[in-house]
Amino acid sequence: MTSKSTIQRLKTNVPGLDRLLGGGLPEFSLNIIAGAPGSGKTTLAHQIMFTLAKPDSKAIFFTVLGEPALKMLRYQQQFSFFDISKINQSIRFVNLADDLLEGGYDSVMARIAKEVKNDSPSLVFVDSFRSIIEVGAKKSQAGSDLQSFVQQLGQEMTSWQATTFLIGEYSPSEEQANPIFTVADGILWMSQNLLRNSIVRKMQVVKMRGQAHTSGLHTFRINDNGLTIFPRAFLTHDTAQLSANHQLPADKRLLMGVPGLDDMLGGGLPMGYSLLLVGPSGSGKTVLATEFLAEGVRLGEPGVIAAFEKSPNQLLSNKLHALVKAGQVGIIDTRALDLSIDETLHDLTSMIDKMQAKRVVIDSLSGFELALAPEFREDFRESLYRMISVLTSMGVTILMTSELEDRYTDLRFSSYGNAFLADAIIVQRYVEIDGQFNRVMSVVKVRGSAHSKDIRVFDIADDAIKISEERFQYEGILSGQPTKPTAP
């Protein structure tokens, strides 16, 4: 061999999968799609098949089902990737049940070889390969039959120059004992985990010969379009690449859209910062977030808002509704349960790219945690850090709201201990003045920048925040005693 051979990669176009695989499936490879019943194995196989099958690149789907393929197709037709015009043109279904029951491994091998020789397909699928192994083992007269069958199948499939998929219901404990996992070039493991009342689906690329793939467990969903996989963001690679693609102007600041607040921040919020806006219920967090987005639109900086506590109809004030309707602000309704951080990050980054957004609002972290599946709440701080790092690396500026119980004598910045994640912090509070509750606001932190230390009274009128023009000094705001503003 005098030159290095090149393996072509087949793009599956399954959202997120090609990224996990390292660019696609190696052509002529032998792959296993394994997992528990109901984890989505057959749906993934069909999605890949209908994407790749063409008149000059045919597919054969071998089934070992007691029911006809027509029944299986009846359900697969519900997915948008299903193309009925490809049936019996680019895609053929062949049932191996009779061959398996009558002659075991030898009959199955002969039938597969015959069909492949006649059609010369580029893609071969066997579902369920586990059924072939179990039924064939009962008819086997020698313990070596399975090993021989697997080796022969691997050799035959290589000579056919077809990319092959064996689908089966396996558990992780079988990976070491089953010989098919040894000869396989690629292994995709799928699972669905039940925790309390939540089901989370995950995928792992256990093995993919000849190319670097993304390790670890990655969540996915099955909807009307089939599978969508949400690859985990890895900070060492993803943020470095994003930062290189999104260079931010030095010292540029964004205006907040609230008169007086920019001065309190030291000239506005530095571009690419993450701002944590904390306060009790009704203190005006969503109103301020809306002003932040509206100011961005006015300056030609589109925005995106992810709503975790309220439905879009509840969230949209007249001002925000007009911005969304005009296509100047994108809104993500994330009220579905059992979310993962990576799914949310996928939706956000997709919307940011679509809108070319410069400003992002997450309203709120409190609702975000509740929307996550229980297992993702355990490492909420770590996952949130990962998400913020990726978003800021895209060059967007983030405003996150967080609801805190106002205890009057207890000053806190985050109920999760996440204040360290923010580059800037604004706190809204209630104080008692002359027997009435009033709202006050202060800037606690702006990393690397001077900012006002004043506590300023503000009010909300006509869905807008009005900060008092005068500066006020409060005495005893943390003492629990009634307070009175005094001019400096």
Image (tube, rainbow, N blue to C red):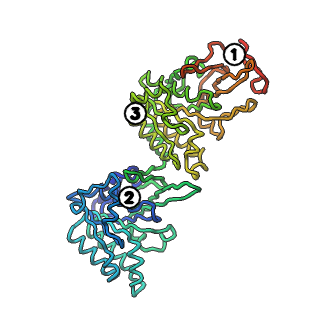
Between disc 1 and disc 3, whose residue precedes? 3
Residue 51 position in % (x across, y down): 30, 54
Q: Residues within 10 Å of mark 1 (few under 14, many from 20)?
A: some
Q: Is residue 27 left or right of residue 370?
A: left
Q: Are marks 1 and 3 in contact (CB under 8 Å)?
A: no
- First in sequence: mark 2 or mark 3? 2
Taking 165 as reference, is 416 left or right?
Answer: right
Q: Is residue 266 visible?
A: no
Identify the image quadrant of residue 265: top right
Q: Position of residue 117 (x, y in %)?
A: 22, 71
Query: Which residue is under mark 2?
Result: 44
Residue placed at 50% from the left, 27% from the top? 317
Query: Which residue does the numbered mark 3 point to in the structure image?
Result: 355
Would you name the residue on which mark 1 appears? 472
Query: Secondary structure beneath disc 3?
Result: helix
* Residue nearest the viewer, comparing 112 with 321: 321
Residue type indicated by callout 3: Met
- Give the SS element for disc 2: helix
Mark 1 vs mark 3, CA separation in Å: 40 Å
Is the Cβ of the residue at disc 2 closer than 8 Å to that at disc 3?
A: no
Mark with earlier residue (2, 1): 2
Q: CA distance from mark 2 to mark 3?
A: 30 Å
In the image, what residue occupies the spot 20% across and 58% down? Answer: 55
